[in-house]
Amino acid sequence: MKIAMFGGTFDPFHAGHAALAQYILDKGIVDRVLFVPAPVPPHKTREILPYADRRAMVEAGIRGMANAEISDIECEREGKSYSIDTLRALAERYPGDEICLLIGGDSLATLHLWFKAHEIVQEFTVLSYPRPESVVSAEILHGNWSVAETEKLLAGYMAEAPVFPVSSTQLRTLLKNGVLPGEDLIPAPVLNEIQKKNYYRN
Ligand code: ATP
């Protein structure tokens, strides 16, 4: 079985996250999607909702989505979570399954800077998809990766995947300004959760 690790802050979970997961499941690109909320993302400096709240939003967002679930694997571990550690831990937890790292084209462009980047690419399948303004090509990848690694990364690039024009940042801004985003931007159960708890208002 092929399992995608879909990591993120999910502050909040939005329709783009849901649509991408549904796309790769519907296309049979993977058999299962594991949403892995990050406990304290090292690169984010703004205030972030606590793990439990973000997790609850992911849960609400994927309710009813077959073959999608949440993994608390990064929260269970002490200290910083590097993707290579999460991927290896998942590989141990799901022996016999193929664990894939799912990232946007924007992240693919900087993947070579990630901790133990070459080990990630050598040990795991990296599935990537177009994001606005991200350009992915053999020439660009060749600058940072070996020929074999470039081939592997290009094989995992889903150029045909649709681009979903929504981000958590955009949603936080709308909600802060009292604007209720539609279902094209956020799944209704996630919006209910946000309204119930009054997130993102201050
Ligand atoms: P923020 O705006 O706070 O940076 P975000 O919308 O990018 O958040 P994250 O939780 O940081 O959401 O993203 C988790 C993963 O989902 C990342 O790999 C990111 O590239 C991807 N992602 C975010 N928005 C979309 C989208 N509209 N379509 C597809 N993937 C997305």
Image (cartoon, grey):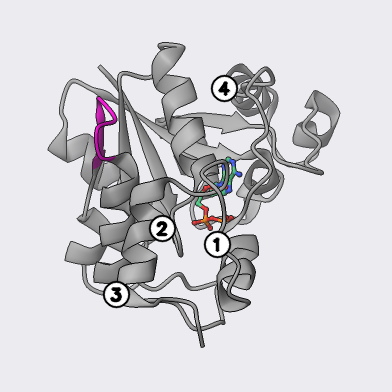
Point out the residue furthest to the top here. 28
Task: Answer whether labels 2 and 1 touch (C-beta < 8 Å).
Answer: yes
Task: Answer whether labels 2 and 4 touch (C-beta < 8 Å).
Answer: no
What mark, if any, has residue 180 been given in the picture?
Answer: 1
In the rendered image, residue 65, in percent from the top left (x then y), is placed at: 29, 30
Ranked by sequence position, the earlier of labels 2 and 1 is 1
Q: Pointer 2: residues within 10 angstroms few (<14), some, or many (20+)?
A: many
Judge depth for marks 2 and 4 and give the one in front.
2
In the rendered image, residue 60, in percent from the top left (x then y), is placed at: 28, 50
In the displayed structure, would residue 29 be above or below residue 163?
Answer: above
What mark, if any, has residue 79 been given in the picture?
Answer: 3
Task: Answer whether labels 3 and 4 touch (C-beta < 8 Å).
Answer: no
The residue tagged 4 is 156
User: Who is closer to the viewer here, 202 or 10?
Assistant: 202
* Residue at the (18%, 20%) spot, across then down: 96
In the rendered image, residue 35, in percent from the top left (x then y), is placed at: 33, 45
Mark 1 residue element: loop
User: Who is closer to the viewer here, 184 or 67?
Assistant: 184
Q: Is 77 placed left or right of 106 in the picture?
A: left
Mark 4 residue element: loop
Main SS, magenta region, reads loop
Measure how far apart labels 3 and 4 are at the Cα level.
30 Å
Ranked by sequence position, the earlier of labels 2 and 4 is 4
Q: Is residue 85 visible?
A: no
User: Within the image, what quadrant is residue 56 found in?
Assistant: bottom left
Mark 3 residue element: loop
